[in-house]
Image: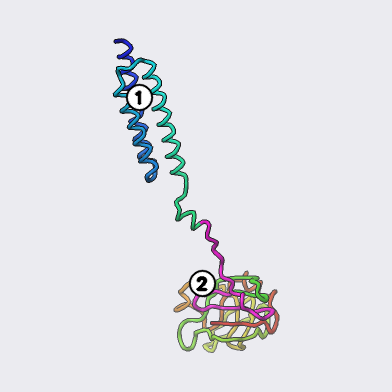
Amino acid sequence: MISTRIGAAISAVVRAVLSAVVNAVVRAAFGAVAAAVAAVVLVSACSTASGSTDSPGSHAAASSLTTQTALQGVSLAATARNQPSAAVRQAADRKITPVNHCAHNGYPQQVIVSIRHQHAWMCAHRKLVYSTAVTTGMLSASTKTPTGNYRIQARVRNTVLTLSTGATYAVKFWIPFDAPLYGFHDSSWQHFPYGSAKYKTHGSHGCIHLSLEAMRFLYRWSVRTTHVHIA
């Protein structure tokens, strides 16, 4: 009788522990693996309860086996939780190749400007040497930046640009490609980010604004006759 009671007590404790483990496994596990583990643990617990009249040795063996099964279930659930999904693995394996805007450049040097993307790429043959956001002309007939193919005509330091309205702008660098009206220059007075869509209403009067750092690079890198493509 004492052995039977001890066995029953052990079974009760095991069932309580297993119940807690099963709940944790079900919450943490993902998909069919966790469900299968939980089912195995529950079946083992029921088998232990139905054999409560067996000897203490049988109860101990059953308890050990059930506990081991539960621990294996927890381990499997943790492994499943830490494994990335198939979609995540496929995304990680997929190589994302950035677009090379210089891939079709056939010139020793060319500056490619995209009005749509408000960006410029400086190419040495098919190699990208510098990439930067820009600000082009406001979208009106008299201020929009002209499109087409040009060449750099000069490289000037510390000058003052004068508009037809008489307004003046001091710049550190002035690199015209369609003199005297259009060119690249810095714009210390601009108070919104280069690359911003605000260029449509607050952009230049047709020139292409670059940051001081980008203008410094363009001044040092380019030469007269460097090709310019604007689209």
User: Which residue type does callout 1 highlight?
Assistant: Val
Number of labels in the image equals: 2
Residue 205 image position (x, y, % from top left): 52, 83
| Label 2 crowd (10 A; few <14 / some 14-19 / many >=20) | many
Q: In which quadrant of the rendered view does residue 161 lie?
A: bottom right
Q: Residue at x 63, y 79 (%)?
A: 105
Residue beneath the point at 61% across and 87% down: 178
Q: Based on the picture, tell me whether residue 202 belongs to the magenta stretch.
A: no
- Are there few (<14), some (14-19), or many (20+) residues within 10 Å of tag 1? many
Determine if the magenta segment contains residue 100.
Answer: yes
Asked if 21 appears above or below 179 in the picture, the reply is above
Q: Is residue 205 left or right of residue 183?
A: left
The stretch of residues the image draws in magenta is: 92-120
Q: Which residue is mark 2?
A: 195
Check the picture and name the quadrant holding the N terminus.
top left
Q: Residue at x 44, y 39 (%)?
A: 76
Q: Which residue is mark 1?
A: 14
* 213, above or below 31, in the image: below
Residue 173 lies in what quarter of the image?
Answer: bottom right
Q: Main secondary structure of the magenta part?
A: loop
Residue type beneath disc 2: Gly
Judged from the image, the secondary structure of the residue bearing numbered disc 1 is helix
Where residue 165 appears, x then y in whole percent? 52, 88
Secondary structure category for the residue under label 2: loop
Q: Position of residue 53 (x, y in %)?
A: 30, 17
